[in-house]
Image (spheres, grey):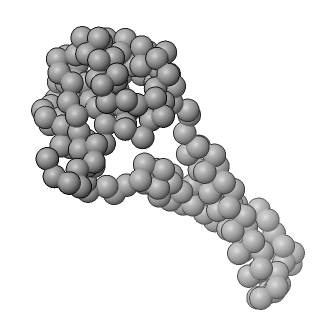
Amino acid sequence: MQDNYQVYGLVAEFETSDQLLAAARATKDAGYRKVESYTPFAVEGLNEALGQRKTRLPWLVLVGGLLGAATGFLMQTIASVYDYPWLVAGRPYFSWQAFVPITFEMTILLAAGTAVFGMLLLNHLPRHYHPIFNTPGFKRASVDRFFLAIEAADPRYNPTETTEFLRGLNPLRVSEVGC
């Protein structure tokens, strides 16, 4: 091995989603917290089994939408009341009903932009390389295999104990993944 070799963690490969779900529950019950799963499709109940918290993205989108609405409304108010106060057909300068379409469009624009960039930010994307890609057979994670990774940064991680724990879950194989 090389002198600068560092371990990212251990990865167990499973054949079915039910095996992965049972392994995820056992891993959470054993006290591991820095655990990630890789599946070819969404597995119902996997996030709860791993103890993953809900995303903050809906709150970010709400804030983006409210900011967009406020921006659109204030932009039109400032323009029509303060910067260019033209009296047209006897209407008041501040006619909020005319501001609704632009306010709506700005709400949608900023909410959608916040959703896209918030998702990228929260997922740490784009990520062109990740140590998990070094796992033997990991290409099958997008086809027909299910992987469960326990990171070496987990406080409960011990190379020998964690390996034995993962082998006790009856995976197809357990692999050590380096950085």
44 vs 135, nearest the viewer: 135
Left of 166 or right of it: where is 115? right
Q: Quadrant of residue 109?
A: bottom right
2 vs 167, nearest the viewer: 2
Q: Is residue 17 visible?
A: no
Q: How many marks?
A: 0
Residue 60, compared with residue 79, is above or below; it is above
Q: Quadrant of residue 169?
A: top left
Residue at the location (31% across, 30% down)? 159
Left of 49 or right of it: where is 178? left
Left of 90 or right of it: where is 114? left
107 vs 87, nearest the viewer: 107
Residue 4, compared with residue 175, is above or below; it is below
Residue at the location (59% across, 50% down)? 61
Residue at the location (18% across, 37% down)? 135
Q: Is residue 109 visible?
A: yes
Residue at the location (57% across, 55% down)? 111
Residue 72, compared with residue 112, is above or below; it is below
117 vs 152, nearest the viewer: 152
Check the image and name the residue furthest to the front: 3
How far across and how far down the image is residue 166, in percent?
30, 19
Left of 135 or right of it: where is 59? right
How far across and how far down the image is residue 93, in percent?
84, 78
How far across and how far down the image is residue 83, in percent?
77, 88
How far across and how far down the image is residue 102, in percent?
63, 65
